[in-house]
């Protein structure tokens, strides 16, 4: 499986992702510059990753400028043709701004940048990154964001629930979905979603920062393993 990691001005998790995908998971991985206008060499069995960071300084609105980068036209076309696209933190924001995922990421309810470990409950196993996990499984994954509060209108929220598109919700270490466990005020405690076709997925927490025992936590690796297993099974 081949991965492409898009680098925008202000990306700062691209090398983390390159390391996990290329060294830890031993997959072919290449960097893609935001001014590239083609994804030549990638097919629908591959995955494009939009990493975390502060693209274009998060000016205007997080992800709102990056969605106009030349490569995003190719990313949108790739996704609509069935290719997999995974956006993490700022990447999730860019996917929402580009229309590949519904909703928007607003400033945290506490109006502060949050950087800490949180717990996630797996709420759907109907996606490549959760297919090998168990519903209700609790994962410890770090977050680092100022604009992570997921918001969508009532109709969109109803569709997300009806179509089983909510992949992760914030929870406590026991799996309880409480207000106190929601770090940013996201609607319904949402930490990650996918599109209706299940080939585009976005999440605010950083699994690449929890993918090796040397970091003290390898829960994030389970998502990468799930993705690779899902592709191998096709």
Image (cartoon, rainbow, N blue to C red):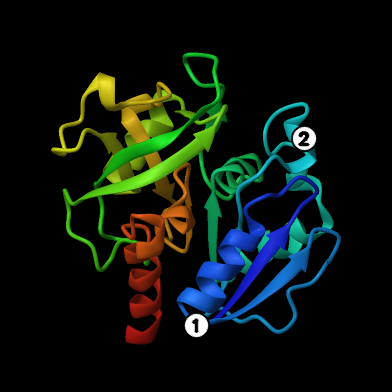
What distance separates the C-alpha of mark 2 from that of mark 1?
Answer: 31 Å
Instruction: Please tell me whether residue 188 is drawn above or below residue 220 in the rendered image.
Output: above
Q: Which quarter of the rendered picture does the C terminus lie within?
A: bottom left
Q: Residue furthest front?
A: 214
- Say if 155 sits above or below 78 in the image: above
Q: Earlier in the sequence, mark 2 or mark 1?
A: 1
Query: How far from the left and from the top, in percent, is residue 106?
Result: 56, 25
Horizontally, residue 199 falls left or right of residue 171, namely: right
The residue located at (78%, 61%) in the rendering is 71
Q: Is residue 70 left or right of residue 99?
A: right
Residue under circle 1? 26
> Helix, strand, or loop for circle 2?
helix
For label 1, count other residues whose C-alpha is less than 10 Å away and answer few (under 14), some (14-19) or many (20+). Answer: few
- Image point 47% across, 54% down: which residue? 209
Residue ID at (56%, 21%): 107
Q: Residue at x 32, y 65 (%)?
A: 222
Q: Please tell me how crowded label 2 is: few (under 14), some (14-19), or many (20+) other residues with Cα within 10 Å.
A: some
Between circles 2 and 1, the one closer to the viewer is 1
- As rendered, which of 159 and 117 lies closer to the eye? 117
Residue 57 — which label? 2
Query: Helix or strand or loop: what does disc 1 sit on?
Result: loop
Q: Which mark is residue 167?
A: none
Q: Is residue 157 left or right of residue 37?
A: left
Q: Nearer the viewer, residue 134 or 117?
A: 117
Specify the quadrant of the image occupied by residue 14.
bottom right
Residue 166, located in which quarter of the rendered image? top left
Q: Is residue 226 left or right of residue 75?
A: left
């Amino acid at each position: 499986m081949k991965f492409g990691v898009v680098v925008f001005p202000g990306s700062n998790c691209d090398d983390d992702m390159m390391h996990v995908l290329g060294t830890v998971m031993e997959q072919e991985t290449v960097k893609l510059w935001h001014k590239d206008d083609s994804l030549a060499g990638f097919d629908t069995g591959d995955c494009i990753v939009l990493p975390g960071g502060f693209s274009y300084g998060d000016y205007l609105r997080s992800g709102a400028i990056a969605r106009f980068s030349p490569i995003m036209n190719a990313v949108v076309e790739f996704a609509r043709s069935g290719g997999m696209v995974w956006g993490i933190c700022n990447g999730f924001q860019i996917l929402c701004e580009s229309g590949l995922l519904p909703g928007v990421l607003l400033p945290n309810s506490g109006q502060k940048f949050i950087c800490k470990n949180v717990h996630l409950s797996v709420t759907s196993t109907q996606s490549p990154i959760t297919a090998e996990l168990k519903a209700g499984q609790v994962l410890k994954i770090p977050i680092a964001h100022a604009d992570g509060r997921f918001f969508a209108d009532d109709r969109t929220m109803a569709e997300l629930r009806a179509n089983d598109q909510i992949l992760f919700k914030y929870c406590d270490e026991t799996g309880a979905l409480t207000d106190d466990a929601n770090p940013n005020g996201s609607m319904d405690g949402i930490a990650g979603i996918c599109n209706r076709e299940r080939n585009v997925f976005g999440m605010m927490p950083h699994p690449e920062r929890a993918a090796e025992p040397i970091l003290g936590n390898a829960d994030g690796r389970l998502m990468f393993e799930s993705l690779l297993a899902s592709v191998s099974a096709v």
